[in-house]
Image: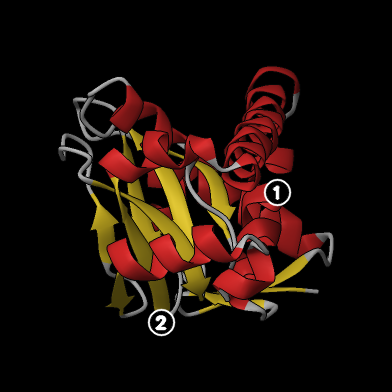
């Protein structure tokens, strides 16, 4: 996988030398808010879901990380010696390379790594703007549909095994509001509701 992302053989050799592979079961958490960032995750297989969580435990979904991608938030935290402000959850069985924080800056001597990090910041920033636009300018039904579409894309299935409360938690709203919206969306034939399942049509 490293060969697919990078072509610089010296960079690839250092990634293989210094990084550690970690396997995660679907639903398990890789990074918690408040954790000291000692590594930056680079996804090899599977998908990570990145969620922002405040001090009160309220959450909001930000974006997914797919194979070949890394977390701009983690890079920013390690460079600023800050603790994590996000949660990284394995959407399915996932494998990541754990890159030591000391190497994040050290590898800027490789042009390819520098371009990769800059591209990561740019892509994640664009995704965050999309989230802000959804929150600021869209109705809740658009936010819910976007969330469901992104989760389905990450799992590769039109059906999600998820509770209304879980959606409410990650969209920072009330379960009752989510349930009403989902029923309305079902009436419009946008989705089909089951017992702890939602299928996009």
- The answer to the question of whether label 1 and label 2 lie on touching residues, with beta carbons closer than 8 A, is no
**Nearest to the observer: residue 185 or residue 15:** 15
Residue 29 in the image, given as x and y percentages of width and height = 26, 61
Residue 176 in the image, given as x and y percentages of width and height = 45, 45
Badge 1 or badge 2: first in the primary sequence: 2
Label 2 Cα neighbours within 10 Å, binned few <14 / some 14-19 / many ≥20: some
Task: Name the mark on residue 62.
Answer: none
Query: Is label 2 in a helix, a strand or a loop?
Result: loop
The residue at the point 29 percent across, 62 percent down is 18
Q: Is residue 36 left or right of residue 60?
A: left
**Nearest to the observer: residue 142 or residue 182:** 142
Q: Is residue 92 positioned above or below 130 on the image?
A: below
**Quadrant occupied by the N terminus:** bottom right
The residue at the point 75 percent across, 27 percent down is 138
Residue 164 shows in the view: no
Quadrant location of residue 89? bottom left
The residue at the point 64 percent across, 28 percent down is 125
Residue 121 shows in the view: yes
Task: Name the mark on residue 146.
Answer: 1
Q: Is residue 44 left or right of residue 28?
A: right
Task: Name the mark on residue 93.
Answer: 2
Q: Is residue 69 positioned above or below 24 on the image?
A: above
Q: Is residue 195 left or right of residue 111?
A: left
Residue lying at the far front of the rendered structure:
10
């Amino acid at each position: 996988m490293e060969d697919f992302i990078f072509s610089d053989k010296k960079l690839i050799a250092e990634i293989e030398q210094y990084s550690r592979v970690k396997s995660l079961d679907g639903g398990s958490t890789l990074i918690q808010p408040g954790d000291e960032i000692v590594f930056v995750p680079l996804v090899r297989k599977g998908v990570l879901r990145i969620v922002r969580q405040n001090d009160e435990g309220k959450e909001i979904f930000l974006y997914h990380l797919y194979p070949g991608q890394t977390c701009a938030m983690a890079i920013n935290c390690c460079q600023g010696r800050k603790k994590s402000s996000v949660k990284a959850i394995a959407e399915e069985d996932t494998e990541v390379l754990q890159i030591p924080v000391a190497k994040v800056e050290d590898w800027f001597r490789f042009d390819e790594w520098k371009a990769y990090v800059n591209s990561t910041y740019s892509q994640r920033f664009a995704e965050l703007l999309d989230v802000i636009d959804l929150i600021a300018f869209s109705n809740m039904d658009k936010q819910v549909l976007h969330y469901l579409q992104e989760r389905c894309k990450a799992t590769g299935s039109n059906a999600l095994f998820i509770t209304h409360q879980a959606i409410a938690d990650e969209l920072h709203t009330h379960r009752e509001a989510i349930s009403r919206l989902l029923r309305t969306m079902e009436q419009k034939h946008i989705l089909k509701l089951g017992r702890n399942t939602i299928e996009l049509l």
